[in-house]
Amino acid sequence: MQYLIEEHLLTVDKIVDICHVTRRTARRWYSGETDIPKAMLRLLRLELTGRIMPESWPHYWRFNHIDMLEAESCYPALTWKTISWFNFTTIAWRESVAMIPPVVRRIDDLIARLPPLPDADIINLAQYRAELEYQQLKYSRVMESDKSRDEILAEEFEKRPSTD
């Protein structure tokens, strides 16, 4: 009984509602003055842990002898752990989906506050490639030559393609 009081916040009023007993009897059970009958204790435990089928559930759903939910179908029975996990994930999913619009609004607000981006310089691709090839050629000649670096650069400067 103490477990139900602590874990499920069992009150005298809940005992009265679930077991259909007088308030005086419920108070005696709650205080431990008298022992609660095993059937009533089991009823409280089943009700407070959600193991009594709600009226809205299909009539052919039931819990089997090993406490698994059977739905008389080709699918295996569900454990309480599976049912609880499904409930948790659906709640988490709803909360996550509900957060999307505020996040999108916040992102839009931050984007609107950004300073304008500077205009980018657009370069001529053919000109850039020619310059790159020139730099590669210059580097390879410097590495392979016996001439000084300055002599090679002077020769290359004269051969350099026009960038106009």
Image: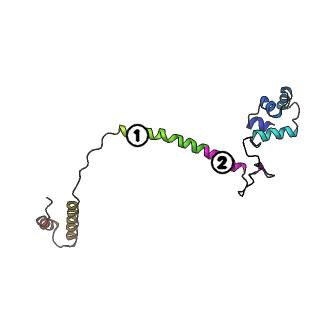
Whether the magenta-drawn stretch holds residue 68 is answered as: yes
Left or right position of 95 against 10 = left
Which stretch appears magenta?
Answer: 62-90
Nearer to me, 63 or 1: 63
Disc 1 residue type (three-letter) = Asp
Q: Which mark is residue 85?
A: 2
Is the Cβ of the residue at disc 1 closer than 8 Å to that at disc 2? no
Q: Which residue is rendered at x = 13% and y = 62% of the image?
A: 162
- In the figure, is residue 106 to the left or right of 46? left
Label 1, on which residue?
A: 108
- Seen in the picture, residue 29 relative to 59 is either above or below; the reply is above
Find the distance from the CA under tag 1 to the CA under tag 2: 35 Å
Q: Quadrant of residue 49?
A: top right
Q: Residue furthest top?
A: 24
Seen in the image, is 67 located left or right of residue 108? right
Q: Secondary structure at mark 1?
A: helix
